[in-house]
Image (spheres, grey):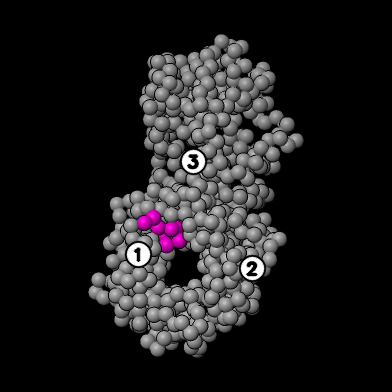
Amino acid sequence: MSGVLLTAGYDRAWHSVLIAESLRRQGTPPTMILIAYPMSLGRIRTLLRSRGRAAILRYLLRRNSSDSSRPTLVQLEANKLGVDSPSLKRWAGRHGVQVVTTGDLNAASTVQRVAELQPGITAYSGGGILRRPFIEATGHRILNAHSGLLPIVRGMNALEWSLLLNQPTGVTMHLIDEGIDTGAVAEWIPVVPNHGDTLDHLRERLVLAGVQGMVRWVSRALENRLVTAPAIGLRQRQCFVVAPALRDICERRLTRTLAG
Amino acid sequence: MNSPQSTFRYAEHLQATLGWLLHSIEAGGGGSSAHFSPLRGWSAPYPETTGYIIPTLLEAARTQKDQRCQEAALRAGQWLLSLQCPDGAWPGGLYVGGKPQGPSVFNTAQIIDGMVALARLQPEGPWMQASERAAGWLAAGVDSAGLWQVGNYRNGVNPSYYAQVAWPMLQAWQLSGDDAVRAAAERVLARIVDLRTPHGSIAGWGFDPGKPAFTHTIAYTLRGLIESAGALENWAAYGQPCEDALERLWRKAEFGNGRLPGAFHDDWRPVNWYTCLTGNAQVALCLLRIEQRANDLRLVNAATKLVDSVCANQRIRGVGDSRRGAVGGSAPLWGRYMFMRYPNWAAKYHADALMMLMARLEEEDAR
């Protein structure tokens, strides 16, 4: 088993392309990039059910608002490394890396390709929930950067839940297993809110810390220095998308925390 | 400190819902009209639900400083007193003048809920005595197996949602100290807990044995057990048996973004083509109640989504008095539960859920 497999949920993802470029610069570029296209009917249905039409509409409006033209911290970091597009395909084409697109990472044909590749380590940067066959095909070595303290804050909207549950903010580097954020933990990377942070800005800082953690741990894994331990503490209920009323409280809490 | 924006939105829905409930009491001549139908207008008043609307109105009077709610609660209480049978029971069905129906176990218990709330407000009033007589009638009818032979909705059928009968009995016991009432309620609860299936559901919690249960009666069952566990300070016996079902409903509420299937089979296979709005509000209340014990905002999150889904199906502007603030039995309105009607109990549980949720959100925001 050797090489790095990188997964992504979209072609145009700054954090994924930053991971790819950072890995290339440390001499371990991805051997293959697996992109799970979000436009399968199953994913759209899941999104609609879990987030609601209104939340998706709000997201799309925000994406198209003027504020979205502001480069994110991750984008700025990628630009510093000479990456001028968030397209993974474009990056892969430039560096001769194989790209496979699929409607579902768990599809039998995709799992077969992963099993044939026998990656030394898989860096997960999106693509949906992974099922057992995919996990087994990777040799149970899939790294994830989760934006919350495990096992307390597992699931979605981890930053918001960290604030709501009065937990420290940061990123947990861990291995993916069949549960939702229940795999063995490699490292906890604290990211403390700074004066002036908004939820969106703090989230960007978490994503950047996660990218850096991912690159560091891929390197360690390839050197056979991947050390993990089971998450300590009682496994808590899974976190789901934060309801608007609680998001409101979350934002007020962050503002008060930073003001106080 | 200002309240969060969401509180204002919920307050608007609460005001509209309470306005509709007051309107239903006007339409019912003192008792709350059971439902409004766009085709047939207001129905006759319903003693059962008028009973449990009383605590909702009293809580609204207290928290919203709305004197009209207290006046309506007292008026409804007087109307119910006029219907109580000499043996302490209340009749079943809707109240249609001159056509008294036989005594009803379930209706009597829900009216006790209202009498107890009024007795706490006016300890010297007639309410406590009415509640004691009713609870005495219920206790006398329970056999050693925890079953009633008389006063059932369907002859010989004691559904598991009678947990919602045991709870008001225990409320009456808390006021009167009559241990025979407590013992009878415990026999009922023990029988119901024994019906728990390997799936975590409770057999017989629907209207019709063997058919899928509406979330309305599922929530009756769970709420009855939760509240009884609290009254008896015995979570292990009556609360724990609900935990699997509540966890499932919590997850299903999250996965459905606040929309639960309208009914479930005992093995949790859903009936998904409609949602039962009153059931959604009732499940939200169950989650908020267990959250008081579990202290886990993740439960509040699901409850918030359930309440939001009911709000999304409620018109609070641009419609007439009979529709403004009304909550449909189902969404769509032609769903199987209360086809094409706006029942008063859907509004009652929505108001209860809004008040409990608003209080919880304000508490959380103040931390």
- In the image, which disc is placed on residue B255? none
Q: Residues within 10 Å of mark 2 (few under 14, many from 20)?
A: many
What chain does mark 1 sit on?
Answer: B
Residue A234 magenta: no
What chain does mark 2 sit on?
Answer: B
**Left or right: residue A194 compared with residue A7:** right
Q: Residues within 10 Å of mark 1 (few under 14, many from 20)?
A: many
Which residue appears farthest toward the left when viewing the image? B144
Which residue appears farthest toward the front when viewing the image? B39
- Check disc 2 and report its element: helix, strand or loop: loop
Q: Label 1, on which residue? A: B160
Residues at marks 3 and 2 on the same chain: no
Q: Label 3, on which residue? A: A155
Q: Position of residue B325 (x, y in %)?
A: 63, 64
- Check disc 3 and report its element: helix, strand or loop: loop
Q: In the figure, residue A39 lies in which quadrant?
A: top right
Q: What amino acid does circle 1 point to? A: Ser
**Left or right: residue B57 compared with residue B90:** right
Q: Label 2, on which residue? A: B322
Region in magenta = B211-219
What chain does mark 3 sit on?
Answer: A
Q: Nearer the viewer, residue B215 or A147?
A: B215
Q: In the figure, residue A95 lies in which quadrant?
A: top right
Label located before the other in sequence (1 or 2): 1
Q: Nearer the viewer, mark 3 or mark 1?
A: 1
Q: What amino acid does circle 3 point to? A: Gly
Residue located at (72% from left, 32% from top)? A70
Q: Position of residue A169 (x, y in %)?
A: 55, 41
Residue B217 magenta: yes
- Dots 1, 2 in contact, CB < 8 A: no
